[in-house]
Amino acid sequence: MYSSRGLGNNAANLAIDSSINNSVRCAYVARRDGAGPGAGGAAAPGESPIPRAGGGADDAVVRVAACGLCGTDHEEYTGELSGGFAFIPGHETVGTIEAIGPRAAQRWGVAVGDRVAVEVFQSCRECANCLAGQYRRCERHGIADMYGFIPVDRPPGLWGGYADYQYLSPDSMVLPIPADLDPVVATLFNPLGAGIRWGATLPDTSPGDVVAVLGPGIRGLCAAAAAKEAGAGFVMVTGLGPRDADRLALAAKFGADLAVDVAVDDPVAALTKAAGRLADVVVDVTARARRLSRKRSRSPVPLAPS
């Protein structure tokens, strides 16, 4: 989780600069092409000044209390995922409304002082995809305007949760949450939502189903919990080697009936022996899921080729 004390200036591509954004502390991923804002591991001071109260009727500013750390953030940090521009990462933001315009307050049903969770995607609320609930495919925004992935030189610059403040555009999706809920716990809204979507909703997990969740990361464990809550009769979670040992040990607490280290055991044989058949539903957050699924099985995402 992000905290102002937890981010160190210990890597060339991640830094904290107290002069950027009118002294708003933030962590940013610098440009790797040697040009423009953020080049060479330093962001230009004042590039993205913090919006102040009264800035607009339709937008808001949230004071960040906590922001989840996702695998995507790690890929951004290491350079595996990079858009070639400087940006403030963090897309699992929980915080308190610091300033808000009247129309934004009415639209989101929140006011100054309310605690909220901020969705990673933005929605125009007008296109066919948004009206159908498929806001990830918004014709105006899509994946180009996801929080935590927007260039810092796009005004007002505070587009990510790894900062003291985050700007909320008019098309933000803001969810009020209880004030007494620990903000660190509340950041689970993102992986838990993904787990429910992948482990229950999209595959239509039904009572008695055998479910295989490949990958014991936070989304995998949340998918296992969601599948069990949806009535799955048997849930298996797989991992790989020592790096996943602790997560596999936790799998039973998330509803798993079987945890398999694929470096040691064959998951196909283990599942067949324990459940009596292959999976009705496979949630693939790794790869090579196809071998585990029986004919006409269901998966929330296309299975990787085996």
Image: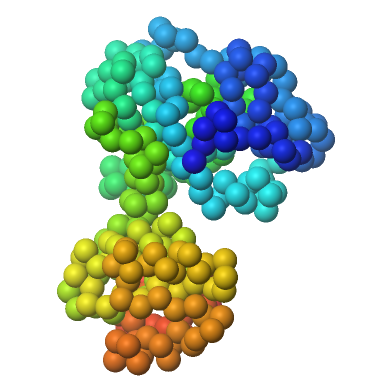
Q: In the displayed structure, would residue 232 be above or below residue 2? A: below
In the rendered image, which quarter is residue 233 located in?
A: bottom left
Q: In the displayed structure, would residue 45 be above or below residue 260? A: above
In the rendered image, which quarter is residue 231 located in?
A: bottom left
Identified at 61% across, 31% down, the residue is: 27
User: Where residue 94 sits: x, y (%)?
Assistant: 39, 33
Q: How many marks?
A: 0
- Toward the viewer: 188 or 47? 188
Identified at 29% across, 87% down, the residue is: 275
Query: Which corner quadrant holds the C terminus?
Result: bottom right
Identified at 29% across, 13% down, the residue is: 102
Q: Is residue 78 visible?
A: yes
Task: Report the side of 170 relative to 50 (left or right).
Answer: left
User: Where residue 226 sits: x, y (%)?
Assistant: 28, 61
- Colouring rule applied to residues: rainbow
User: Where residue 96 sits: x, y (%)?
Assistant: 36, 23
Q: Is residue 58 visible?
A: no
Task: Report the side of 168 relative to 107 (left or right).
Answer: right
Identified at 51% across, 45% down, the residue is: 69
Q: In the displayed structure, would residue 88 be above or below residue 279? A: above
- Toward the viewer: 95 or 139? 95
User: Where residue 219 sits: x, y (%)?
Assistant: 41, 58
Residue found at the very far top of the displayed protein: 54
